[in-house]
Amino acid sequence: MKRDDRQIRHFAEHLLHSGVGALSEQERRALTRIARRIQATSTDPNANLLSEEGITFGERLSDRVAEFGGSWKFIIMFCVVLVGWAMVNTAFLRGGAFDPYPYVFLNLVLSMTAALQAPIIMMSQNRQAARDRLTMIRDFEVNLKAEASIADLHKRIDHLTWQMLGDLDQIKRGLKDGKDSAPAAASSPQPEAPDSTNA
């Protein structure tokens, strides 16, 4: 079992036995947000949309149609077809045109194309919105983990700061005690050194 898993399990067991009474307000808000996100992701029917393995043929096709329909290649090809259709039926075929000037058949083809293309593009947009929502949820979870890590770092830095202040206080007391004992030692009578001239 990984270290993170052990910590999560220990935390869950601690919460089960002691409840949330000992938690700070910030920790309660974080747990509430996590619980809401877990409920949202577990009931989301589009939870597998980020993986390409669960995509059906129709979904892949809708993505391709939306991708091609929103490109300059499609726009240029469509303009060429429209202008070519109009020129063939007006300038070249004249009296024997299969779709003469108001181009009724062309209007029918364009209407049918738009009627099919619009829902296909909407399907692709719905899938993209679901993917964006899942990405947002995952980003939120990453931000929540980062927030918890930063809060933990703040606690550690505060602990180290208080520890350093305590050490500095002990050093100051030691220096103060050393200064107090130094004058007392200086004021006590020193034994005289033996006179070397009498030897």
Image (cartoon, helix red, strand yellow):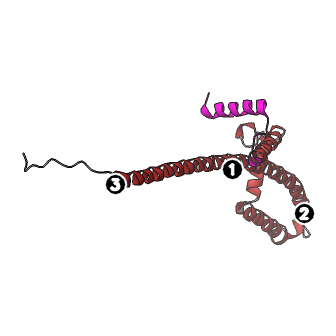
Indicate the quadrant containing the C terminus: top left, top right, bottom left or bottom right: top left
Query: Between disc 2 and disc 3, whose residue precedes?
Result: 2
Rendered image quadrant of residue 19: top right
Q: Amino acid at mark 3?
A: Ser
Any magenta on residue 179?
no
Label 3 to label 1: alpha-carbon separation: 66 Å
> Position of 41 compared to 193: left or right?
right
**Residue located beneath label 3 in the image:** 187
Label 1 to label 2: alpha-carbon separation: 52 Å
Q: Work out whether 144 lies above or below 54.
A: below
Comparing labels 3 and 1, the label whose residue is closer to the camera: 3
Report whether residue 98 is seen.
no
Q: Which class describes the residues within 10 Å of circle 2: few (<14), some (14-19), or many (20+)?
A: few
Q: Which residues are magenta?
A: 1-26
Q: Amino acid at mark 2?
A: Asn
Q: Work out whether 139 lies above or below 35.
A: below
Q: Main secondary structure of the magenta part?
A: helix
Q: Secondary structure at mark 3?
A: helix
> Position of 58 compared to 189: left or right?
right
Q: Quick one: 126 or 84, which is closer to the camera?
A: 126
